[in-house]
């Protein structure tokens, strides 16, 4: 079973990170009218590169140990608004909605890639 330890590769972490980013963007949208709310985002590139380096350097002392998950909170950044709000809220609704739409498309692409990988493994096990 050792050949199945990493069948999804980095896409497992990418899916988790994309889900986390969509949650952060939805929190921004929900707080669009909250005074002094600071819009947050995820530095996807930095989080993925840290995730891949952690994944490569991770050493387990026992086969029953679980791998490291998450840890993307360190890569949250505050977004600077283009048009300042009078109540010091940095959420720009049109920008947040556009980013959420792009991220949901990327999320679906990652899910589709994982589904294709699982389908390929199923076909290989059936001998097709």
Image: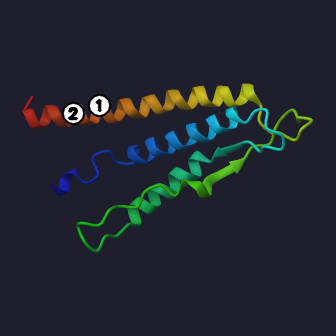
Which one is in front, 42 or 90? 90
The C terminus appears in which quarter of the rendering? Answer: top left
Residue for badge 1: 116
Against 112, residue 73 (above or below) is below
Residue 124 is situated, as x and y percent measured from the top left of the image, at: 13, 35
In the visual, does 104 lie left or right of 8? right
Residue drawn at point x = 35 percent, y = 48 percent = 9
Local SS, label 1: helix
Local SS, label 2: helix
Residue drawn at point x = 69 percent, y = 31 percent = 96
Residue drawn at point x = 32 percent, y = 62 percent = 66
Instruction: State the separation of the CA atoms marked 1 and 2.
Output: 6 Å
In the visual, does 77 lie left or right of 44? right
Which one is in front, 80 or 39? 39
Is the C-beta separation of discs 1 and 2 under 8 Å? Answer: yes
The tag on residue 120 is 2
């Amino acid at each position: 079973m050792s050949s199945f330890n990493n069948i999804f590769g980095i896409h497992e972490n990418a899916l988790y990170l994309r889900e986390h980013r969509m949650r952060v963007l939805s929190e921004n949208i929900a707080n669009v009218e909250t005074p002094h709310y600071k819009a947050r985002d995820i530095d996807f590139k930095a989080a993925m590169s840290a995730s891949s380096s952690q994944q490569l350097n991770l050493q387990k002392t026992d086969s029953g140990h679980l791998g490291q998950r998450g840890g993307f909170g360190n890569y949250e950044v505050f977004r600077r608004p283009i048009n300042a709000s009078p109540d010091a809220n940095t959420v720009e609704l049109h920008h947040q909605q556009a980013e959420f739409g792009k991220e949901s498309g990327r999320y679906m692409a990652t899910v589709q890639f994982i589904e294709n990988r699982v389908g390929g493994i199923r076909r290989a096990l059936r001998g097709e």
